Every structure is written in C-alpha cells, then in structure tokens.
Amino acid sequence: MKLLPAKEARITPEGRHWFFGYYDIPAFDSDAGRHLALEVPFMDRMPEPTDAAKLYCIDLPSGRYTQIGETTAWCFQ
C-alpha cells in the first residue's frame, strides 16, 4: 500500500465553527485544491428553522475563502 504525504494545517479562520460531511461525499475537489465547508455561529444546540449556515469554497493553494451561498436547510449530521 502506498502512503500519500500529508500535513496538518488549519484551512478555516478561527472564531466560528466550520464543518462538512455527508456520508461518502468528499469535501475536496478531485485535485484536492478546493474544499467545501459550512460555517455556523454555534455548536452547542440544535439548529432552529431561522438559523443560517454559510457555504464556502476554500481555495487551498491561495488560502482564500469565498462565500458561495447561505442556507437554512442544514443540520450537524
């Protein structure tokens, strides 16, 4: 088995809560140059119908993150 090189690095700004995950859907594009993430202002309760999550595309080589949408249809699962 070939091991791929990896390093640990923060890719999101501090101060808010960032996540992505849905079963077997990867958060990275096929070249691992961009990452999809949700940003929310809390993690200590369940979301209410009016709580919005911001959707971002993070460009890993440049470190830029761009908001591409916002939704109230989300959960922590």
Image (spheres, rainbow, N blue to C red):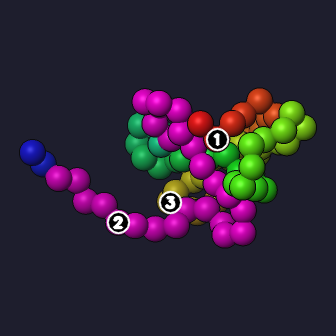
The quarter of the picture where residue 36 lies is top right
The disc labelled 3 sits on which kind of residue?
Pro
The disc labelled 1 sits on which kind of residue?
Phe
In terms of depth relative to the viewer, which is nearer, 55 or 58?
Answer: 55
Mark 1 or mark 2: whose residue is earlier in sequence:
2
Q: Is residue 13 above or below residue 4?
A: below
Span of residues in magenta: 3-27
Residue that badge 2 annotates: 7
Residue that badge 3 annotates: 61
Please rate how many residues cluster around mark 3, counting C-alpha atoms within 10 Å: few if below 14, some from 14 to 19, many from 20. Answer: few
Label 1, label 2: how far apart the Cα atoms are: 26 Å
Q: Position of residue 75 (x, y in %)?
A: 69, 36
Residue that badge 1 annotates: 76
Mark 1 or mark 3: whose residue is earlier in sequence:
3
Please rate how many residues cluster around mark 1, counting C-alpha atoms within 10 Å: few if below 14, some from 14 to 19, many from 20. Answer: few
Please rate how many residues cluster around mark 2, counting C-alpha atoms within 10 Å: few if below 14, some from 14 to 19, many from 20. Answer: few
